[in-house]
Amino acid sequence: MHGNHQGINIEALLSHVPLFNGLAPEEIARIARGTREINAARGDILFHKGDVSNGFHLIVYGQVKLAFTSPQGGEKVVDILGQGQSFGEAVMFMDKPYMVYAQALTDSLLLHLSKAVIMDELESDPKLGRKMIAGLSMRLHHLITDVESYSLHSGRQRIIGYLLRENLESDEKSITITLPTNKGVIASRLNLTQEHFSRILHELSEKGLIVVEGRKIQIPDVEKLRVYDL
């Protein structure tokens, strides 16, 4: 991993980040001074569990998984993040080492924003503080929804919920979705073994509720899938 010197415009990238919407150009310029770019190849580790945090990351493009390894050597994926998402803010505020590791799932470009600069901006700009709190609250809300889903929903319901999550509002009868990454990573994210995940996909396709072609999953009748297993 290395910064490249083609001189991407960090200020321009930062000004497109929802977190920094509404900040003045001089505020963006100050944040840019504490920001470095990271080019990560697929498979690169951005930080290990136990590393000390001195800022947080923002994904310009690409995909990153946050995970930890169980004592038995298995992996538990905590989150799969994509373009425009940030991670590591909570740890930065808590002065604690990272509780997970972060690994690029595809070639990615990230920005690392230094804690010192962000702390200075928070002193002078309450708007930024409110946005960061909103972002962290959203994350907490997702986490609670996850725990609820692990506790109360069957594996089948979790998978159906995951397949339909982007299309809760849509009234299309049939949709095709593309899984963002391999099935093992998604299974772990849903707290299922890969075997269990594959078995349920197989069952849903035998019932004609989904058609699986590699990472593409076609759902011929959204409503039928939604009410299956309720």
Image: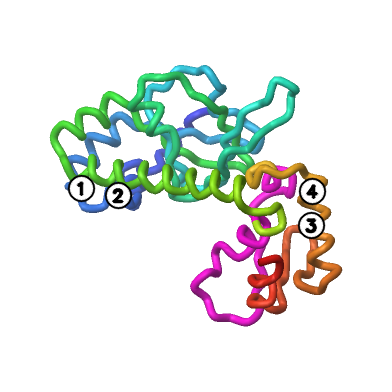
Q: In the visual, does 61 lie left or right of 26?
A: right
Discs 1, 2 touching: Cβ within 8 Å? yes
The answer to whether residue 1 of the structure is visible from this angle is no
Determine which residue is flagged by label 2: 15
Discs 3, 4 touching: Cβ within 8 Å? yes
Determine which residue is flagged by label 3: 200
Of labels 4 and 1, the one closer to you: 4
Residue at coordinates 52% horizontally, 76% vertically from top-left? 170
Q: Secondary structure at mark 3?
A: helix
Depth check: give the residue in front, 183 or 224. 224
Determine which residue is flagged by label 4: 196
The residue carrying pointer 3 sits among few (fewer than 14), some (14 to 19) or many (20 or more) residues within 10 Å by Cα, namely: some
Determine which residue is flagged by label 1: 23
- Residue type (three-letter) at the residue carrying disc 4: His
Discs 3, 1 touching: Cβ within 8 Å? no
Q: Where, quadrant-wise, is the N terminus in this rendering?
A: top right
- Magenta part of the protein: which range? 158-187
Q: In the visual, does 199 lie left or right of 102?
A: right
